Amino acid sequence: MSFAGETQYAVEILDCTSDPHGQWGLASYAGYPDTRMVGATGNFTGAGIGHMMFYAADTTGLFSRYRWSVNSGAAKTYTVADRPIAAARVI
């Protein structure tokens, strides 16, 4: 899903959740898996590695919106005005 005036980025994340990132079995899932979900079944809770989509405004480079996975669709996209988010990069 794309939005005018915004650039999207697939970002690998580490987190702890009971709701894995992505929907297993969709064409885009294999490239952006969640370690909590192996095959159609798996341990869907706890720490793991998944992928989120972050969007940045082309004019400012700041976060504009995000969604929990690469294949969750526009219905699950949140603007930072509605649901603020912060991110950090550990190097």
Image (spheres, helix red, strand yellow):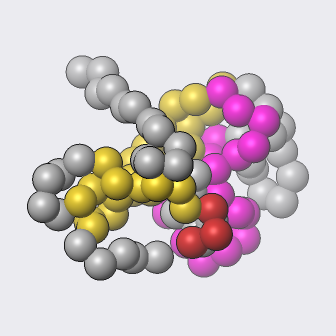
Extreme-front residue of the structure: 81
Given residues 7 and 90, the one toward you in this image is 7
Residue 84 pos. (x, y %): 47, 39
Question: In what quadrant of the picture does the C terminus appear?
Answer: top left
Above or below, 19 against 59 in this view is above
Extreme-left residue of the structure: 59
User: Does 17 sit left or right of 70 as displayed?
Assistant: right
Above or below, 18 against 1 in this view is above
Above or below, 10 against 16 in this view is below
Residue 79 pos. (x, y %): 46, 55
Residue 8 pos. (x, y %): 33, 63
Residue name at image x 57 percent, y 72 percent: 74
Q: Main secondary structure of the magenta part?
A: loop
Above or below, 37 against 76 in this view is above
Residue name at image x 75 percent, y 50 percent: 38
Extreme-right residue of the structure: 41
Given residues 5 and 90, the one toward you in this image is 5
Given residues 89 and 62, the one toward you in this image is 62
Q: Quadrant of residue 19?
A: top right
Residue 32 on the magenta span: yes
User: Does 46 sit left or right of 76 as displayed?
Assistant: right
Q: Which region is colored magenta?
A: 16-35
Q: How many marks?
A: 0
User: Does 9 sit left or right of 67 as displayed?
Assistant: left
Residue 43 pos. (x, y %): 83, 38
Residue 80 on the magenta span: no
Residue name at image x 83 percent, y 45 percent: 42
Residue name at image x 53 percent, y 55 percent: 78
